[in-house]
Amino acid sequence: MNALLSVSDKTSLLPFAQAMHALGVRLISTGGTAKLLASHGLPVTEVAELTGFPEMLDGRVKTLHPTVHGGLLARRDVPEHMAALAAHGIDTIDLLVVNLYPFEATVARPGCSLDDAIENIDIGGPAMVRSGAKNWKDVGVLTDATQYPAVLAELQASGRLSDKTRFALAVEAFNRISQYDGAISDYLSAIDLPEDGQAPVQQLFPGQANGRFIKLQDLRYGENPQQQAAFYRDLEPAPGSLVTAHQLQGKELSYNNIADADAAWECVKSFVTPACVIVKHANPCGVALGEHALAAYGRAWQTDPTSAFGGIIALNCPVDGPAATQIAKQFVEVLMAPHYTAEALSVFQTKPNVRVLQIALPPGGDTAWAQGRNAMDVKRVGSGLLMQTADNHQLRLVDMKVVTRCQPSPEQLQDLLFAWTVAQYVKSNAIVFCRQGMTLAVGAGQMSRLDSARIASIKAGHAGLSLQDAVVASDAFFPFRDGLDVVVDAGACCVIQPGGSLRDQEVIDAANERGVAMVFSGVRHFRH
């Protein structure tokens, strides 16, 4: 058996090559890889010896030769192929170990120049990988160090790789080439190269968008039973994102479970202090802060017990026995938290259908809200795609502009911040009533902001909650004073809204007339 090894990342390569040599495999290699193997006493044949040509053009040309690609592409079951190899003195290559120049890592570095990016575009590596993977029935292609142990174990056990293994390796190889080429296309098609010799400018959005995702699982069905679905993750998922969750128990997640769970988790990790978010049909129906999981959950549940039935619950703090006992009294579809005590897990063992997920919070402490979030959002339209930077704006106290004679108290300012954070995760038009770190009513997804406000008031009444002296967040400006009048009539004493309407002064005058405080955030949080 002949193995060609040519890697940029040499992690774990030496012990793998030593084990291959012990199996009697002939090692062929290039440049720095060959030097590494030879320096540890391994017999290695350099590619230049096979091709009769030295590496050229600063290493740009070394494996682009019929001796290499003939050895990879020749079908062993086709006599004419084998005769052609014999006629030209070419040996077959049965195992190819290649990983590519670090293009993705290079362009991710701040200050990467176009020249640096170009020099890290691998040519010979992808060509060999494609040749070997195309001929998967005869050639095993390894493109990542994580594949070494399993391949070595199979070779040690049977002396060959099975068809199933070689095919799986070929699929992974073509996936890697697709990822690599996609990254190059994304980078280069975002470069604006001026004609006057000025420095290249990298645009935010590439000329061609190349989505690259890895399937985590097939789902039973999609949003509805007549739809098929699957769940994918980014190639490099951000820490603290939903795709990093570990399911500790319960039924398989459904399409709707995953969509709602993401909404709940993204909202709850926006808070630093212990918090609970309950989501139903993609909207928070209860959000609250508390000293611990039990307190936060109890207050969140109070907002809208009817909607919370069968909801998705997310906490950003450990779940202990008392909290688990209280949560388990209700019908819960999915529960998420960064940690569970042994007592808590034993409680949920009596509820085997509850999907219990453990997700580590993103690193960053007080700035964790900025971590583990998508940089870009995408939405499918007919035969097209909308792409935008994600709405990751975080409002601070210093950003808030009081525009009325009535001034919010320090406690009310904190509640306004809380309400504004919740409103960011509510479908537009969004109206959120809060008091003392707890949602009192949420109006979501209506065509009219007035209707969202009225629905919120109705839901508060159903839950037996008073809206007197509540603060209110509106995700977009009030185009007329009527929306303000509705929330004030319901009991609001403070309102936060973006501002920016042609009738801002009319709405401010109405707030002064009604004796309520109004704060402008300066940003809008539409969520469709």
Image (cartoon, rainbow, N blue to C red):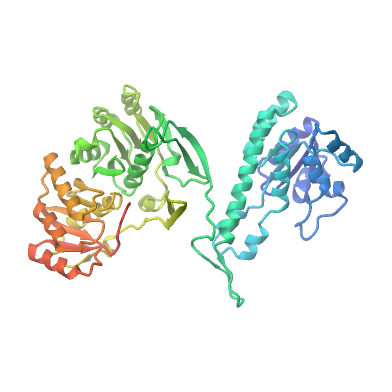
Q: Nearer the viewer, residue 330 or 87?
A: 87
Q: Residue furthest top?
A: 350
Residue at 64% across, 65% down: 115
Q: Quadrant of residue 327?
A: top left
Depth check: give the residue in front, 289 or 444: 444
Quadrant (top left, top right, bottom left, bottom right) of the N terminus? top right
Determine the residue positioned at 73% across, 51% down: 124
Residue 134 in picture, x, y percent from top left: 71, 40
Examine the image and state in which quarter residue 25 appears.
Answer: top right
Q: Is residue 209 in sight in this rendering? A: yes
| Left or right, 269 with reference to 460 | right
Q: Position of residue 315 (x, y in %)?
A: 31, 40
Up-down relation of residue 316 to residue 388 (above or below): above
Which residue: 52% across, 60% down? Answer: 206
In the figure, is residue 159 to the left or right of 418? right
Residue 427 higher or lower than 333, as above or below: below
- Asked which quadrant contains residue 73, the reply is top right
x and y percentages locating residue 498 in the rendered image: 25, 62
Residue, far bottom? 196
Nearer the observer, 431 or 113: 431
Q: Position of residue 125 (x, y in %)?
A: 71, 49
Tell me, yes or no, if residue 144 can be seen here.
Answer: no
* 62 up-or-down from 248: above or below: below
Give the number of marks: 0
